[in-house]
Amino acid sequence: MKKLLASTCLIGGLFIGASSASAADCGNIVIASMNWQSAEVLSNLDKIILNEGYGCSAEITVGDTVPTLTSMAERGQPDIAPEAWVDLLPDIIGKGTQEGTIVEIGSPLPDGGIQGWYIPQFTAEAHPEIKTIPDMLKHPELFPSSEDSSKGAVLNGPQGWGGTVTTSQLFKALEGQKSNFTLVDTGSAAGLDGAIAKAYERNENVVAFYWEPTALLGKYPMVRLDPGVEHDAEEWKRCNTVADCPDPKPNAFPVDRIVTLVAKGSIDKIGPDAMSYIEKRSWSNDTVSKLMAWMTDNQASGEDGAKHFLKNNKDLWADWVSPEAAEKIEASL
């Protein structure tokens, strides 16, 4: 799954064009929720704020990324996709923006979707000399394999994941075996999560492929190792993402661009005040990861998570909305 936003002039023009609408005019809105946790909680957050703060009648529809974003680009429905990982569908999103059916309005996750090799925060603090992947590969003794403690281990994801392929190719490119490391297939998402959690709770060093924002990194603070090189998009496509490519080069994972998409035909009915909220609304990967960790620990729904965030983080969300909307939202909780 993972930078240029719509220009200020374009957004300003859109808001001016919608100036005849007001919060009271906000109509029926369909919000797209993708089938992962951060998108679920964000769509519910938007629903609560738009309904309670701006008088909208917003409902959520749940769908997969490809059909949802394709529908928005081609037919202008649903009205809003709060968390759209647009790099997954560059052709479809590009066509929709060029033809004027969809507009990018701000980014809910300006840090972007991040992947890489991570170590526990306590490991990074205890070993400040380890800042990059090459630094880590100099210390197999710090990350012993559970199967052979004479070797270091890098935990990989299960077969079938794109990140598993790229981690395997990077391990090959960096000659991990020559550094006395082995690449460990954890077998499943649960296996990878379990291995990281077990090591963390035992205060043991571990290095693993992972990504953010995620509940796991919200619960277990991890530090992403700098790859030591810049991202080379051409080389990434040529070999780093191809499982049987024989000659991968060291490379950096790309950062996925995440934006909010709004159907252009829906801007007038949403109104300038609510559109201003959508443009301003954003949170860090760390904030949403910690919220997702709370949701996971409490078996909470997206609506539960959104209400928990609103009740406990007014210092963050109050700046996204007007004072009048903030009062209404707070009174509804």
Image (spheres, rainbow, N blue to C red):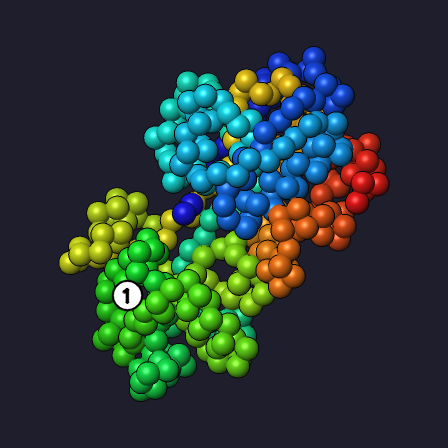
Question: Residue placed at 22% from the left, 56% from the top?
Answer: 243
Image: 225 above or below 142: above
Relative to 159, 298 lies left or right:
right
Question: Residue placed at 58% from the left, 20% from the top?
Answer: 266
Kind of element beneath mark 1: helix
Question: Residue placed at 62% from the left, 59% from the top?
Answer: 299
Image: 297 above or below 60: below
Relative to 170, 285 lies left or right:
right
* Front one among 126 and 39: 39
Visible residue check, residue 51? yes
Relative to 60, 52 lies left or right:
right
Residue 327 location (% of width, % of height): 83, 37
Residue 205 location (% of width, % of height): 46, 78
Q: Amino acid at mark 1?
A: Phe
Image: 290 above or below 143: above
Residue 19 location (% of width, % of height): 68, 15
When asked about the image quadrant of residue 192, the answer is bottom left
When asked about the image quadrant of residue 15, the answer is top right
**Residue marked by disc 1:** 171
* Front one among 89 and 13: 89
Relative to 235, 133 lies left or right:
right
Would you call the spot at circle 1 few (<14 residues within 10 Å), some (14-19), or many (20 or more)?
A: some
Q: Quadrant of the C terminus?
A: top right
Visible residue check, residue 230? no
Question: Residue placed at 30% from the left, 45% from the top?
Answer: 233
For the image, the number of numbered tags is 1
Residue 46 location (% of width, % of height): 65, 37
Outermost residue to the left: 246
When asked about the image quadrant of residue 3, the answer is top left
